[in-house]
Image: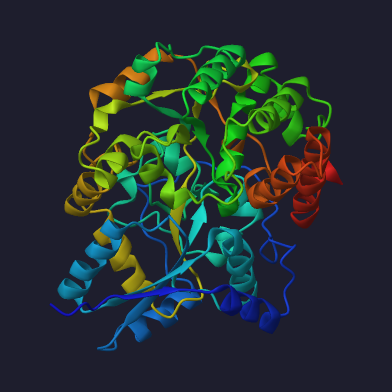
Amino acid sequence: MKKKILVSLLSFTMVMGVLAGCGESASAPTASEPAAKEESAPADNGAAKEEAKPAETAAATADAGEDVTITFMASQDWIQDAEMELGEKFTEQTGIKVDYQIVPSDQYESLLMTKINAGECTDIFGGQSSQFSIVTQFNVEKNAVDLSGESWAGNVDPAAAVELSAGGKLYGQPIQDVSACWAVAYNIKTFEDLGLSIPTNYAEFCDVCEKIKAAGIIPIYECVSDGWHHVCWTEAAVAATQADASYPDALNENKATFEGNKELTTMFTQLKELADKGYMGDNYMSNEYADAPASIASGEYAMVLYNQGLGAEVNAADPSFPADNIGYFVNPLCDNQALNVNYCGPSRFIFSGSKNIDAAKQYLAFMASDESLAYMTENVGKFNQLPYSNAPSAYSAVVQDFYDRYPKKVAVFQASVKYYNPAWMDIGADMSAMFLDEMTPEDVLKDIDKLRAEQAAAASDPAWN
């Protein structure tokens, strides 16, 4: 059957061309005219749909055409093959084609903000949810369509809806499983063969790594080249919240800094130490995230920071490798033993300037249907529980054991601290420099304060003025 879906990968050259053509600076990832109101609340999903905005009214006419193609731009790894397969079914049912525009992760944010600020964004754009950044970065009340009245809106998990809402209205739709957290996934058989136990602090983690290394196996698969994955280790920052529960609020009120925080300094210092001791091997700067499952399946590596779908992905890479041979434990930097909870994640937004708003809404409704959510859960290994009340659960015994082992839950900084998530890729660049001895852990923390201050200034945040 001939495919009716369009899939494109935007190359580095194309991205740079768009950036240059629009005349926007890649260092200013904040939408124009940001809303002053920072707080947001869960959408009133029972509310009646409001009268369409001018852009939405204009869109209805465009959707009336016989040949409609909606464009959907997203960062690499956000759109799964299963979603594109569903896109084909959507086209068969509606006649509406879907052009998926996948952008390398290290270029995506700059390109997205350039397109939004120029008023030339795709019909649907992918963005990380966060009750803070969707206002200060995307300015969703101006640049996205209110989805509160859509039929599926009431099914979105309330905690996830909070991170997609502004002014009591829902502006986004979750793409991925946000119940899964980033944890250290490990080869259970390797641990058993070497007589290793799950570490409960950093010293024990280093001991485990040393014994694995001595056995001729690289302890940790890391992939700095993607620009974002190594930053996930910083979710151990929950240790700072445990040491001082008021710390996130103090950061949000500009009464505290990253620089000088004992726990955060320890976290970056320990991460650098893991690399320096050879626990990440020789190729951690050039490894790619997409190769993680195969690298674990090969037995060359024993552990990787990943979500709870790795078992299924490793099994897909090598069917002889049992999915339940992958176990999980929390990131032990700073001796952390709390589950890092984050209801933020890649999400779909409809651009308010789109001429195909009705068609885009049909796509979102299709993706949130019982059938589509079941298909995504069944066909994407890392999706165990998508954040919808009508999505099935697929937790394995191994994954459930992991969650049961850590009853204490603490929100990660992406969800609790303003201007942290928008700085993610810049933090990743600084951490890369740290690994190369071009920056110290203290330099990285100081730069995070600078990056957050720039975001706050762009948002006219009174706490920074």
For the point 18% across and 67% down, the residue is 89
Left or right of 278: which side holds 197?
left
In this view, the residue in front, 45 or 227, is 227
For the point 78% across and 40% down, the residue is 444
Residue 403 visible in this rendered orientation of the protein: no
Q: Residue furthest bottom?
A: 66
For the point 81% across and 36% down, the residue is 440
In this view, the residue in front, 428 or 279, is 279
Query: Residue 254 at x, y = what percent?
Result: 80, 35
For the point 44% across and 74% down, the residue is 56
In this view, the residue in front, 242 or 57, is 242
The quadrant holding residue 419 is top right
Q: Is residue 326 above or below residue 319?
A: above
Q: Is residue 421 above or below residue 172?
A: above
Q: In the rendered picture of this protein, how many numbered marks are placed on residues?
A: 0
The quadrant holding residue 257 is top right
Residue 213 visible in this rendered orientation of the protein: yes
Query: Residue 37 at x, y = what percent?
Result: 67, 49
Q: Is residue 447 above or below residue 356?
A: above
Q: Residue furthest right?
A: 465
Quadrant (top left/top right/bottom left/bottom right) for the N terminus: bottom left
Q: Residue furthest left?
A: 1
In this view, the residue in front, 286 or 445, is 286
